Image (tube, rainbow, N blue to C red):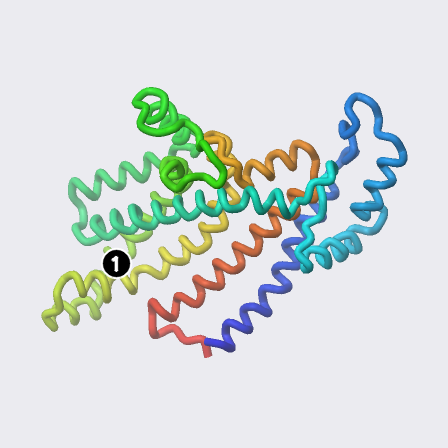
Amino acid sequence: MGRYVLRRLLQLIPVFLGTTFLIYWLVWSLPGDPFAGKCGDRPCPDAYINNMTAMFNLNDPVVVQYGKYMLNLIQGDFGQTFNGISVGSRIAEAYPNTIRLALVALAIEAIIGITAGVLTGLRGRGFMDNMVLVSTLFLISLPVFVTGFVLQIVLGFELGWIKTTVSASPAPWLELLVPGFVLGSLSMAYVTRLTRTSIAENRRSDYVRTAVAKGLPQSRVVGVHLLRNSAISVITFLGTDLGALMGGAIITEGIFNIKGIGNLVYLGILRKEGITVTGVVTLLVIVYLLSNLIVDMLYAVLDPRIRYD
């Protein structure tokens, strides 16, 4: 296992460099003057433009710019915005809110999705199975912003059960339940269907029939033998979805006024602050890569037949 982890960590290096360079090149190659509008209605003085050009190494080739940026990033320096504000401090303020929101969404989709999938997979076709299939199809068909606005209007404005916006930063866990449900609703439907299909296929397997024939309790047959062997595809989806949840939180954070990285990226794009966008997206790449590594290591825990020699 140790060799495998080391080999995977080494494999992550070229992937990380390739993806972050692509992002850096795309962000800093956007057409237009990056300093337009930074000095109000008047054009910026030459001294300001020269200073900013030198600060962001804009006269260098993109490869050299990227190399200098990565050297600073390794030392924990995310750079400064055009206004002189540390990007690292802005990310440090925003990231906890998005991490909390993504974790709440991931917990909701895992708990509800796996539970619904197991129940419908075990019982086969019937009222509950049809109800879950229709519900998941409904969630898949609805765009996230529609689900968000509907829940905000019904639960917040009409019934008064929730606050329509998140009131503080860092965001209170309780106030993140509805935004987390909105963010994770689409993935929850996929988790339900993946679990249902996997359980329905594996419950007719030989090892399950053997476990039943040995007289094991149903809870052990389902929890230890059936669910464990059916969870690989679901764990794979959940692991890769963590990064997607963090990167796709822009709409949910906007609806519920959550000061997270989605909001930070949106403002960075509007203000053409490439340094902010690059820093946030680089962190998201790290989250993607590490979550995939953890998922790969979980395979051996879930299925002992998988070895990493």
Reply above or below: 213 against 22.
Answer: below
Q: Where is residue 111 drawn, in percent x and y?
A: 30, 49
Residue farthest to the right, as pictured: 46
Any part of residue 34 in sight: yes
Q: Where is residue 278 drawn, in percent x and y?
A: 66, 46
Type of amino acid under label 1: Glu
Residue sitting at 66 percent across and 56 percent down? Answer: 76
Circle 1 residue: 201
**Is 283 on the left-hand or right-hand side of 159?**
right
**Frontmost residue, 118 versus 34:** 34
Residue sitting at 60 percent across and 35 percent down? Answer: 266
Residue sitting at 29 percent across and 46 percent down? Answer: 112
Any part of residue 185 in sight: no
Callout 1 secondary element: helix
**Frontmost residue, 73 versus 274:** 73
Q: Where is residue 10 drawn, in percent x and y?
A: 59, 69
**Is 26 on the left-hand or right-hand side of 33?**
left
* Figure label count: 1
Q: Where is residue 114 drawn, in percent x and y?
A: 29, 51
